[in-house]
Image (cartoon, grey):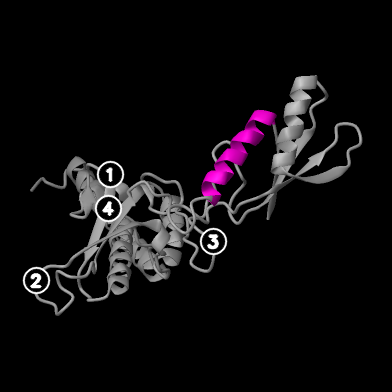
Amino acid sequence: MFSSSTMSLDVLKEVKDLADQYSASGSNGRSGWMPAFSHIETFGPTSGVAVERSVETLLEEIDQVKRCRMTTPVVVLNHLLTGEQFVPRLCQVRTAHHGKNSLPIPPSISILETSQDSTQARSWLSEFKNITLPRNVVELSFSRSSGPGGQNVNKVNTKATARCPIDAEWIPLWAQPGLKKSAHYVSSTKSIMITSTVYRSQSQNVEDCLEKLHNVVLTTASALIKNETSEEKKKHIANLERAAKERRRKEKSYRSETKKRRSSGGWDD
């Protein structure tokens, strides 16, 4: 979808700087969160005619406007997004990356207190369990494996180590306390660290790390989600409640009859 935001001159420059940072990140880090843009559509204050200009040209014109105290043009940024509304000052896009491996973003729920919370969590879980984590959600490093394993041991950096911030947006808030208790949590960096030396191939060990990370998050998050009660179980519970209510009614009636007999002299010989 296209998102348009009217921005002040200072905000425009801030957006341009942040966009350049994202564009320059290449294939590493958080690249893909926000595609680069080079042109901005502006509307003249009097003509109202839309004109597409390069960012550099527009910034030069803005400087001239400020120096000459001319009427400032209204700047509208049209930017193709794949997530929620573009926030100029934060440059946040609520997708971890673009493409067919897009990660489902969990609901912003810290504690699963209500049935509605659990329903939203289950909806996220049904999507998350079927995805494969992409490499760009972790920071990768490599080192030499130790122990038996063939000719590559102690010669080639095949051991893979993956680190992911525990507050990454694709990790549910309600799962974070549990993840902090995990053996994979590193408190000094507030991250989850996964290692793999299973394979002699570096790329295979990376995939193994990503699979392990996926399982750790999936298991921790799902453990706190209350299972939805089936219709059959609901009927069984309702029947038990009715039976208990009927039993209490009979006990109350019996006690009432006993009191009546006592008061009417039923205990006399």
Q: Is residue 169 magenta?
A: no
Please give the residue where the numbered disc 2 appears in the rendered image: 147
Q: Element under label 2?
A: loop
Q: Residues within 10 Å of mark 4 (few under 14, many from 20)?
A: many
Q: Earlier in the sequence, mark 4 or mark 3?
A: 3
Give above or below for 69 relative to 74: above
Q: Which mark is residue 190?
A: 1
- Gap in Å between the C-alphas at discs 4 and 2? 25 Å
Magenta residues, start to end = 8-23
Comes first in the chain, label 1 or label 2: 2
- The picture places residue 116, in percent across and down from the top left corner, at 46, 52
Q: Residue at x 57, y 39 (%)?
A: 17
Between 92 and 162, the residue placed more toward the observer is 162
User: Is residue 88 visible in this depiction of the protein?
Assistant: no
Location of mark 4 (residue)? 192
Q: Earlier in the sequence, mark 4 or mark 2?
A: 2
Q: Position of residue 248 (x, y in %)?
A: 27, 53
Label 1 and label 4: CA atoms lie apart by 7 Å
Q: Which label was assigned to residue 98?
A: 3
Which residue is pictured at 50% across the width and 58% down the height? 97
Residue 179 - label? none
